[in-house]
Amino acid sequence: MANIILISCVSKKLNKKARAKDLYISPLFKFNLRYAKSLKPNKIFILSAKYGLLDLEKVVAPYEKTLNKMKAKEIEKWAQNVREKLKKVSNLEKDNFIFLAGERYRKYLVQHIKNSEVPLKGLGIGKQLKFLKDKTK
């Protein structure tokens, strides 16, 4: 069983192409990534509104797209694409998935994954940042 962490993308990005792990520059993303690495998972991916499942090292261009402005059917289609990519790099039945992502990014994924955790569930941004800072000292 592998531990896989999924971090949602954020709107604050560099204005040029970069590796996915460097493209997103908000404090929340940076702390999520630091926390994810501290857990020593087998894999970490970004859930990107535009690119779907993103490897941290993949070079991508900045974009203006968010699931927050999508209709449910669009998010479902996005999640189906992410699930197909996840099936190629993980086992949805046996692996453990840790979501560092909001409800819209998790909603249509969690129901297809047997083992999942959402350590930041129900926390506002300020409390998420506090949790992440405390866990990464």
Image (cartoon, grey):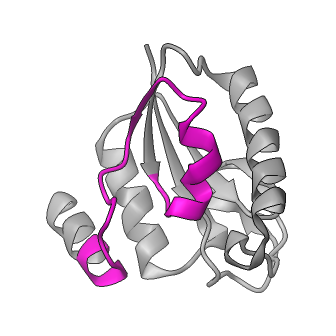
Residue closer to the observer: 103 or 20: 103
Which quadrant, please, contains the C terminus? bottom left
Left or right position of 80 against 95: right
For residue 119, above or below residue 90? below
Examine the image and state in which quarter residue 86 appears. Answer: top right
For residue 69, above or below residue 18? below
Which quadrant, please, contains the N terminus? top left
Number of marks drawn: 0
Magenta run includes residue 97:
no
Query: Residue 56, percent across and down?
Result: 63, 50
Residue closer to the observer: 93 or 86: 93
Q: Which residue is found at the position 32% from the left and 60% from the top? A: 120
Residue extending farthest to the front is 72
Q: Which residue is found at the position 68% from the left and 49% from the top? A: 57
Q: Which residue is found at the position 48% from the left and 69% from the top? A: 29
Examine the image and state in which quarter residue 23 appears. Answer: bottom right
Query: Residue 40, percent across and down?
Result: 34, 36
Magenta run includes residue 114:
yes
Query: Residue 24, percent across and down?
Result: 61, 73
Look at the image and give the residue range highlighted in magenta: 100-128
Left or right position of 118 against 26: left
| Residue 68 in view (yes/no) | yes
Left or right position of 74 against 86: right
| Residue 58 in view (yes/no) | no
